[in-house]
Amino acid sequence: MSLLEIEDYRLAFDGFEGRAHVLDGISLSVEAGEAVGVVGETGCGKSVLARSILRLNPAPPARVTGGAIRYDGADILAMDKAALRRMRGSDIGMVFQDPVTYLNPVFTIGQQMAEVLRAHDRRLSRAAIRARSVALLESVRLPEAGALLGRYPHELSGGMRQRVLIAEALAGNPRLLIADEPTTALDVTIQRQVLALIADLVRRMGLTLILISHDLGVIGAICRRIVVMYAGNIVEDAPAEALFGRPLHPYTRGLLAAIPDLKRPDHLPASIPGSIPNLRQPPPGCRFHPRCPLAMPVCAKVKPVLAPAGDEASHRVACHAVATGTALGAAVPSAVPA
Ligand SMILES: Nc1ncnc2c1ncn2[C@@H]1O[C@H](COP(=O)(O)OP(=O)(O)OP(=O)(O)O)[C@@H](O)[C@H]1O
């Protein structure tokens, strides 16, 4: 049994202008100890998928229209409030993009850590809370952890605040960590440090990781498996080496071609023409077909299924052109992130 199993999961948002079909049959299994990256353009449903695992999408307007999500065999969609509370933090920890939003400006770091720790164990003494808070802050490599407990969020840098949130996410000893764009709000050097920290925690604590980013370079730095999403669908799921070396889906090839090549600064990266479709009226068949250089008549009619393709057994692609061999001759982009 996989640690996390998502099966044909569908979620829509109801609004004044109609229903947006944001996740359109997501199937994904994550094994214990895996580090899986989820990548795709803005608006393709990465965050909604991450929040779905913890049932954090506000309902309404969110509405699950099909499928199942299981954590360690337990049906997340059927859990009551108490079971959900136990799962959040204790089994699954989550780190979000913007640390400022998730830290309360009027409480010290120590008070906020204490609140998180007490939510996991009401019986903890003040001394135990302090010792555990210091240990957690040290585990995310924050210097002078004891003194930090008395500081307010505005007294910390962006990178420090993100480390505090990672420490809070680890407070309940989760087995699965979901990090949604954890470095997007940080500047480049701090981004690298926070990524290195996440990679180190995954190794040291044997965590299972789902890392969400629009940046293939960020994902490639940590994850051995990469899932590519487009407009609410998984279009490719592959070992990182296969994805960077032999990408198969035309959308993945477009994403790779859009990465600037540092060895060729005079060469502008190609962009994928067009934009993500309106999810209230998504294109029929393959949602990528209006932008696809390899589109065939069948692509506008039949949704392609995610099926094994390429040399690796775990490489899966949802593309009619790949399935029929039409895509084989198409050039593979040369840009590969460092
Ligand atoms: N609470 C909500 N109400 C209505 N629509 C929503 C809500 N949350 C997300 N959506 C819609 O769901 C779609 C997917 O959004 P999501 O945030 O998952 O994209 P993303 O791939 O994570 O993008 P980004 O990289 O910009 O975070 C978007 O069209 C968005 O407008």
Image: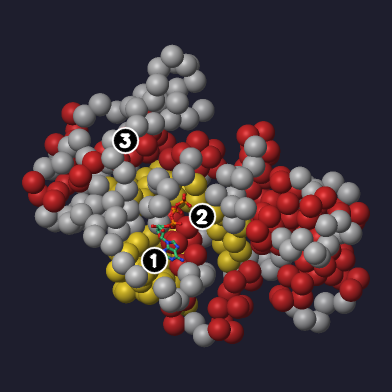
Q: CA distance from mark 1 to mark 2?
A: 13 Å
* Residue matched to label 3: 272
The residue closer to the viewer here, 276 or 177, is 276
Can residue 269 be seen in this snapshot?
yes
At horizontal 34% and vertical 70% (from top left) the residue drawn is 16
Q: Is residue 274 left or right of residue 220?
A: left
Where does residue 168 sit, x and y in percent of width and height? 71, 62
In the rendered view, does 325 fall on the left or right side of 160? Answer: left
Ligand 1 sits in quadrant: bottom left
Q: Is residue 105 above or below residue 68?
A: above
Quick one: SS at disc 1?
Answer: strand
Label number found at residue 278 = none
Q: Residue furthest front?
A: 16
Mark toward the start of the polypeptide (3 vs 2): 2
Q: Residue at x 45, y 22 (%)?
A: 261
Residue 221: which quarter of the image? top right
Measured Cα–Cα span from mark 3 to mark 2: 26 Å
Q: Are marks 3 and 2 in contact (CB under 8 Å)?
A: no
**What colour scheme does the image use?**
secondary structure
Q: Position of residue 27 (x, y in %)?
A: 34, 62
Nearest-to-viewer mark from 1 and 3: 3
Q: Circle 1 sits on which residue?
A: 6
Badge 1 crowding class, 10 Å Cα cut-off, few under 14, some 14 to 19, many 20 or more, is many
Q: Nearer the viewer, residue 201 or 332?
A: 332
Q: Residue furthest left?
A: 297
Q: Nearer the viewer, residue 241 or 150?
A: 150
Distance (Cα) linking label 1 and label 3? 29 Å
* Mark 1: amino acid: Ile
Whichever of callouts 1 and 3 sits on the residue coming sooner in the sequence is 1
